[in-house]
Amino acid sequence: MSVSLLVAIAGLTGVGVYMITARSLSRIILGFSLLGHAAVLALLASGGPAGTPPLANQNDPSTIANPLPQALALTAIVISFGLTLFMLALAQRQQNLTGDDLVEDDLEDIRIARMATDDDDSETEGVES
Amino acid sequence: MTVDSFAEPWILWTLLVLHVVAIPLSALGARRDHRLGLGIAAIPPLLTTIWTVILLAGSAEPFTTELLWVEGLDVGFSFRTDSIALLMTLLVSGIGTLVLTYATGYFSSSSAQMPRMTASLLAFSTSMLGLVLADSIWTVFIFWEFTSITSFVLVGHKDVDASVRDAARRALMITGAGGLSLLGGLVILGSEAGTTSLSELEPITGGRGWIAALLILGGVATKSAQVPFHVWLPGAMKAPTPVSAYLHSATMVKAGVLLLAITGPAFVDVATWKWVGLALGITSMLWGGITSLRHRDAKLILAWGTISQLGLLVTLLSVGTAKATFAAISILFAHAIFKAALFAVVGEIDIRTGTRDIRELGGLHRTMPIATAVAVVSGLSMAGVPPLLGFAAKEAAVEAALKLSGIDALIVSTSIIGGSVITVAYTTRFLLGTFGAGPDTSVAPRRPGMTIATTILGLGSIVGYIAMGAVNNIVRPAAIEIDKKAEVYLLYRWPGLTTGFMVSLGIVAAGVVVGAFILNRVDQPAPEARGADMVDSGLDRFLAWAPQPIAAIQHGSLPVYLATMVLVALTATIPFASDIDVDTLVLWDSPFQGALALAIVVAALAGAFVSSRLGAALTLGAVGLGVSGIFVVHGAPDLALTQLVVETVIVVGFVLGLGHLARSFPAAHATWKSVRMAVSTILGVGVALALAASGSNPSGTPPIEELAEAAVDEGGGANIVNVILTDLRALDTLGEVVVLAVVAIGILALANTRETEANA
Amino acid sequence: MIGGSSPVLQLGVRTATPLAILVGVYLFFAGHNAPGGGFAAGLVFGAVVTLRAIAGIQRPTHAMTLLSGGTLMVIVVAAIPLFFGEPLLDQAVGSIEVPLLGKVKSGSALPFDLGVSAIVVGLIIALLDGLGVGDITAKRPQSPDSSEVAS
């Protein structure tokens, strides 16, 4: 397996995770794109070494690159494309609502945590809010 | 028609399905009238009983049957019909039928809770049936847990009462914890024995045997209420009596003993199994008996007596001699019959007189003659007095105890004999206290449903003695199933004046004296349920403490959640690190690839640290270009082309959508930044290592030439990748475009809400 | 949003449109034997729509029509073999003579790819709509044809 590809995959994964743990939705979208690239490259890398393009009428089958991971990778690209577009639309909507694209803490979770610690009046509080 | 035509898997499956189908039907019936519901619920157990009797009478060939879900992992349901499974089925379904009949009388009004009660009783019966017939350890575990859950629902029947809820919770927590322990034990047992099938278990020799033994004994001890895990059983007596009679004396508490018997042969070489089992059994036998002598509530006397009897069974099975095993199976059978009868009678007394306190009861032999007769017969059977089934079984136990040799013999035989004396004593006290002299208690009229069931259960002890041959035909093969050497033993109606018989005589005499003596000291206060209180307060303290960790874990910060998930997922790659074969690694497929990889990493890093959104979007574009380049070098022009266009659209979309936001990203906290950096660096390296490891161990060579051939012949195209997408694997593509369509509709929906909000 | 567009940009886009469409059509038919395919072609068509929207020439519409039409088409192509006792999505291979490309050996993959392209274009139009790009053209009082002169 090509170490260069592994380095690219490691780099893309690392930066991708770094970006999706950010607060800004724009960065998260970019991070997901990078993770998508990493996944596609991982598919290619696991399919074997590089070769000539898998065109049966131009190249000898013994020299061509493994076409199966390419087909899978094509699907992966398309799906990550769809995902990215959807997140863009979400970010756009967030921006229309709040004027910014920051990911807030989950209010519901915070409320659960608060309910759990203020034990006595927790239940009534939960009902009221 | 021969018997073997009944030994068909489809009949077993039909019966099980019938049970399941009847559960909702019985609830529906009970909404109309509780007798109708219980009647519907009784049909499947009745049919199962008949089927079992046919198989047992004809000594049908045992069979196994399974419904596999995950092949190779043995995940699925599998059942067997060997002798011990059939014996237990007879008890579960036979007593189940009688208990359901009994319940028609016990529950008088068609209360709103009857549908739940009826359905839960049948659901329990179904779970128990599945448990006793189960062959694979997974099936055992699933049904084991089902019985715990249905037991919880049944114990908590009167859910308006706080003490009942506590009792139900206690039972669930203890048996549930035991279930987890059991699962651990079964997993180890399965891997040590190399099979998940109970009918194929061989003695295990591995070094982890003792862990499996301890864990399985944990399950056994909680389910079969062995000291110190017994505290849930007396509390469970808050359940309606049909439930107590069925679950907590005849069947569910026997599940632990059954498991002990079935898995016992695998642990013959594991000393832990024997000694821990003996310790549990002897303690429970003695402590249960002694506590029983101190109670005044007839139902609790019986419940503690059950703990004692279960202790006896555990002791006998742990001893491990063929004779003891044979005695254990015999007592298991006899006990289910007489204890169910005794509980049924106590329930009838409770309903008809309004009390279960033996000080307040008296003169029942005049007002409730049938119940008294059943109680006396069953009580004497429990005490081991001829001519009753319990006598023959107890005789076998005494014989087995006397036959023991070695250092353990003294302790075990003394305990068994001592336990038997106590059993006779609490039986005497129970019978005299409940039915003997005393103020006449006013009694409500008899209810036929209860009387029919108690009478049949009471007759069981007599018929079992008369038809000893038939009982031997049921009990002996089951004992042989566990220990081949048990084939030389038989139950006898009259053993002759052997040493064992003389000892039995002494036991009965001593027990009667002790029982009568203690009966007169009824002013002693009933023992407090200290163990149960400790469990309850422990649970309460745990529940009071639990919010703190929950608040800490459920902090609400999405980035921290993500980082945590990533770290956990990373642990999955650790096992692979050692599989990397350095020889399979090359620096690059071509120098271009190396250069492009470097460029990608640099661009990605730049994207992470550039502070403006537009800059970040452009670096993303650069990364996309680099990846396209790698595709070209790799020999994947389709990917390169698609990637290029995709990247363009995304960058344009990004700029259009987010470009006008504040130019710079908000600043993040420095510490959090370094944590993220650490996590993402580790993950990047971990993923690369895992990939390298998987690449080092290819499972075969890719069928490239076959694919090329198939593309031209079947797909009629030379571009193999596209033929795969539109023909060979077109279903994937179909799914993929559907995803795209759904995404598009989602985006349109988001856009529409914006318009609506703007208009509003 | 992106501000008003210059006449130069509009002219450029108008000139590029037929060329880009030609590229898309080539990719669409070439896909079976050479790099390309329905997805790539759809993306190129989508890029054309995007450019025209940004330049303020044409407001992108009919997302739902393209989406539903495309989905219907792929499903019909997928299901037809079932009626002939063949497995789902089985290929019917035939030859079609296409100008410039010569004989294209293809069959039911062609309508299938057409459906894919339609969905991709529909998706991109939906995105433009979702990002509010469509408003650029809508805000202009003039009809698209007269916009050139007006701005």
Image (cartoon, rainbow, N blue to C red):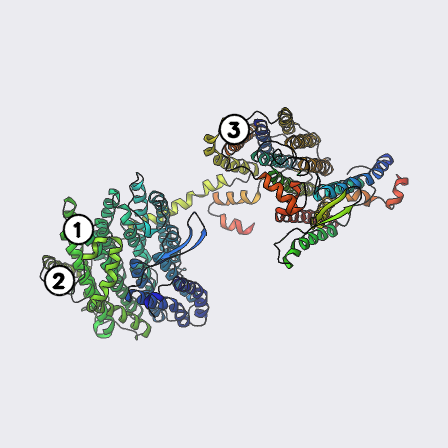
Would you say residue C123 is visible in this rendering?
yes
* Marks 3 and 2 in Cβ contact (< 8 Å): no
Which residue is disc 1 drawn over? B415
Q: Are marks 1 and 2 on the same chain?
A: yes
How many C-alpha atoms fall within 10 Å of the one at disc 2: few (<14), some, or many (≥20)?
few
Q: Nearer the viewer, mark 3 or mark 2?
A: 3
- Dot 2 falls on a residue whose secondary structure is loop
Q: Which residue is mark 2?
A: B495
- In this figure, which residue is indicated by the disc labeled 3? B584
- Circle 3 sits in a helix, a strand or a loop, which is it? helix
Location of residue B431 (image quadrant): bottom left
Q: Where residue B355 sits in the image (x, y, percent)? A: 28, 66
**Location of residue C35 (image quadrant):** top right
- The chain letter for the residue carrying disc 2 is B
In-image side of B299 versus C88 (left or right): left
Question: Mark 3, residues whose alpha carbon is within 10 Å: few (<14), some, or many (≥20)?
Answer: few
Q: Residue at x 21, y 49 (%)?
A: B319
Kind of residue at disc 1: Ser
